[in-house]
Each structure stands twice: as C-alpha cells, then as structure tokens.
Image: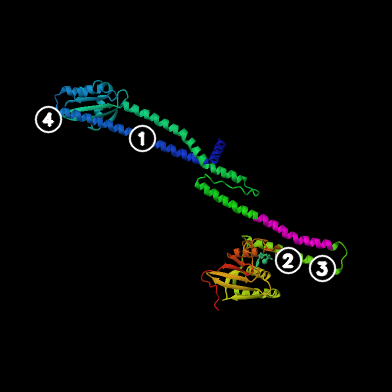
Amino acid sequence: MSWNRASSLAAFARLWGSLSFRLTAWYALAALTLVFLATASLYLVLTTELERSTDLFLADKLHVLRTMLRDRPNDWDALREEVELETAARRYEHFYIRLLDEHNRPVLTTPGMTDQLDLNQLARQTRDRPDRPIAMFGKRGQSFRVARATALVGTPPTQTDTIQIAIDLSEENGLLARFRIWFWGILIAALAVCPVAGFEIARRGTRPLAEMAATTRRITSNNLRERILTEGYPSELASLAATFNKMLDRLEDSFERISRFSGDIAHDLRTPVNNIRGEAEVALARARTIDEYRDVLESCLEEAVRLSELISNLLFLARTESPFTHLNRERVDVSALLGALQEYYEASAAEGGISLTTNVESPVVAELDRTLLQRAVGNLISNAVTHTPPGGSVVLASRVDNSTVCIEVNDTGVGIPPEALPRVFDRFFRVDTSRSQASGGTGLGLAIVQGIMLLHGGRVDIASRVGVGTRVTLRLPALNEGDNNVIPA
Ligand SMILES: Nc1ncnc2c1ncn2[C@@H]1O[C@H](COP(=O)(O)OP(=O)(O)OP(=O)(O)O)[C@@H](O)[C@H]1O
Ligand SMILES: [Mg+2]
C-alpha cells in the first residue's frame, strides 16, 4: 500500500517536472476557476434579482389594496376583483391574498389559499415584521414569499384591517433549477475541454524547446556546424536560441584553434626530431672521424636545445593560460627593469649593428610578477633585434598614461604586413616561416607575451609599418588608488 503511494507520488513528481504538464495544469485550473466564478456570480445575481422583483411585486400589491381600502372601502366588486380574480387570470405567477377585519375575521380570501398555506403559521411568522416579506413553506412543501400589512379603512379611517399576502415561487424555483443544471453542465464541459485546450497550448508553446533539444542532441565535437533556426520562434526563445548559436560559434572557433594548435605542435616537434634522427643515421652509416662525430653531436645538441626550448615554451604558455596560475606580485621599478634588460640584450644588439636604448621620462613602479614581465619584455626585445637590419635602432620606453602603466618596445625594423598583423599573437604564427625557421623562432613568443599580460589584467597592442618599424605596447593597470606609480625624482 505504502509502496503504491510512494510510486504514485514519484510518478506525479516526474509529471510535475514537465513544463508542458505544469502549463496545462495551471491553464486548466485558471480557466476552470474563471468559468466557476462567472457562472456562480451569474447565479447569485439571478437569485437576488428574482427575490427583489418578487418583493417589489408584493409591495406593489399591498400598496394597491391599501389605497383601495382607504379611498373606496365599500367598493366590494373592485376588492373582490383584486383579491379573488386577478390571481386566477395569471398563468405563472400565483399569489394569494387574505383580508382580515379589525377582529381578525377573514373578510375576503383568494380561493385555494387555505389549501396551500397554513394561515395560522403565516400570521405567527409575520406578526413582528409588518410589510417585510419572508420565506415560508406551503402545505405541500412549495416555497412561498409572504408578507403582512395593516391598512386603514375609509377617509377618515374608521377601522384598521390586516392584509396577508403570499406568492408562490414554484416557477422561479423551476427557473433556478434549470439554471443550476446549465451551471453544472458548463462546469463539466469546462472540466473536459480546459485540460485539452491547455495541453494543446502548452504543446505548441514548448515545441521550439523540443526542436532546440533535438538540434542540441545532434551537436558533437565532430559536428559543430549545426545551428538552431530561430525563424518563427517567439522572441524569448529566439533570443535563447541566438545566445546558444553564439556559444556554438565560440565553441567551434575554440575547437578549430585547438585542432590547428595540435597540428602545429606535432609539426614543430617532428622537425627537430627528424633532424636528429637523420643526422644520427647518416653518421652511423659508416665509420667517421672524431671531428665528424663531434660535428654531428653538436648539430644534434642544437636541435635538442631547440626542441627543449619549444617544449618549455609550450609548458610556459599552458601555465599562463591556466586559471590557477599564481602571480608573485611585487612592487617593481619598471624603469630599472628596462635598464637591466637593455644591458642583457646589448651584446646581441651590438652584434647585429643595432643601437638599443632606453627612454624613461621618470621612474615608474607597478605591482607585478617580475620574472614574467622580464620574460614578456625580453621576448619583445628579442623580436625587435631579430627583425631590425644593421644600422637600425630599438628603443625601450615606459610611462604612466591615465592610471595605466605603458611599456613600449619600438624598432626601425622590417615591419609586419597589415594582413599578418591580427595573427601575430596566434601560437606558431610566423610572418615568413623560412626566415623565422632560420633564426630559430618557434612562433610562440608573442602568444606568451599576450598570456602574461592577460594574467596581469593588462593587454598588449602592436602597430607596425612595413619598412618603417614596429611598436609593441604593454598596458598594465596602475597601482591601487592612493599609491603613486611615479617615483619622485
Ligand atoms: N618587431 C618585429 N618586427 C617584425 N616582425 C615581427 C616583430 N615581432 C614579431 N614579428 C613577426 O611575428 C612573428 C611571431 O612572433 P613571435 O615572437 O610570436 O614568434 P617568433 O619570434 O617567430 O618565435 P619565438 O619568439 O617563439 O622564438 C614572428 O615570426 C615575426 O614574423
Ligand atoms: Mg619572438
């Protein structure tokens, strides 16, 4: 028994979990309540209006009789007409009147009144409520509305008579009974129709959701092309579908980048490994002199160094992109750091016939990871030196611009063509593959710079003109408010 209850509860919970079911239930409940309230209030209005019109009829009759008794007390024909005959002429509205004299003796009575009503009971019940109609049951159980009133006879009055009046409500009750049947009929019909209509509305309303779910099921990592067609959808669902499609665009883009990246890694790892293998195979093909072996080993070492550089760059890049990477932030004198880097790269710049200078207006401090920033600026200097022909110059600069610390590396090198500029931060991207290969570049330097800047909450911008030179700007958020980025001279 309890298992049955538990399983039906679980089934209901499952049903309630469905949006269509909930919409249907709420719609049916709302529609049924509305139908019930409408018919019930109509019924209420009808009963009160019927009662009011009955009471008005009684009051009207009493008024007529009173006027007659006052103005024409001896016109018995008229009185008899009013009391005995008029009701007989009516088909549906049966009323009964009894006129009693001062000593409570009946003077005139509508025929059949004594058969219908217990007149003693009528007298008792209406005694304390003159002129106020009340409900009463007849001898055969029919409903009556009865009233009692006193009437002055003659002008000036000679005596006071009593009028008892009763109206049979059978016709009205019949009308109300028919109305009640309609009322229940409408309710039962609504009970049958509302859930069906509600279900149809819910089904139509949630159809786009089902279509979206079907499209989503078709999306896999191999099939990211699929999109939801938003035409004809209601605006709320169209915006949901559009948001979903945008997310798919981003996913597709990321997947494409990742697969390109893996392809590039495989390619870049294969080249040095193949070189080492080829050289070793050639060396082992026959006996070699010591010097020849040394040459081969040196060449292998070079390739191994390149390989390990590539791997460490990749690892470093992965680290900069990890959300768990911790920054060792400290107050760093950026101008001093640029000075140190200038000293470090001076020799290689001089070797290429390039002048390397630092241009710092006033010393600048920023809170950042010293090692990472050294690496970022080092990559930029190395790029500038590599791509600047002899006689050119590389200038390092730093300044504070609108609460942003800017570090610039300018060169008068070969520049980057405009079509290549948006891609230089992509991993493994090299403008001229053969030239960069010769200079040993892995194509990861600028991607690393960008990763480091993002870690610091900053950004990197590049501007370049072919044959004129390149300027790379690192922008970092300044120190907390109240701190000063510029050290007083
Ligand atoms: N200052 C510059 N002048 C001209 N071209 C540049 C400059 N800096 C970068 N580039 C171009 O952008 C490409 C990408 O630079 P990036 O530093 O990412 O890679 P790389 O220097 O080739 O290799 P790595 O830095 O990993 O050793 C370079 O191959 C080069 O073509
Ligand atoms: Mg580089």
Residues in magenta, as a range: 257-282
- Mark 2 or mark 1, which has the lower sequence index? 1
Q: Nearer the viewer's eye, disc 3 or disc 4?
A: 3
- Residue 42's label in the rendered image is 1
Dot 1 falls on a residue whose secondary structure is helix
> Mark 2: which amino acid?
Ala
Q: Residues within 10 Å of mark 3 (few under 14, many from 20)?
A: some
Q: CA distance from mark 2 to mark 1?
A: 95 Å
Image position of 441 (left or right of 278): left
| Rendered location of residue 55, percent (x, y) | 26, 31
Q: Is residue 222 above or below residue 480?
A: above
> Mark 4: which amino acid?
Thr
- Mark 1 or mark 3, which has the lower sequence index? 1
Q: Residues within 10 Å of mark 4 (few under 14, many from 20)?
A: few
> Mark 3: which amino acid?
Asp
Image position of 95 (left or right of 335): left
Q: CA distance from mark 4 to mark 1?
A: 47 Å
Q: CA distance from mark 3 to mark 4?
A: 153 Å
* Residue 116 position by quadrant: top left
- Residue 295's label in the rendered image is 3
Looking at the magenta stretch, what is its main secondary structure? helix
> Mark 1: which amino acid?
Leu
- Mark 4 or mark 1, which has the lower sequence index? 1
- Mark 2 or mark 4, which has the lower sequence index? 4
| Rendered location of residue 110, percent (x, y) | 23, 22
Residue highlighted by disc 4: 155
Residue highlighted by disc 2: 438
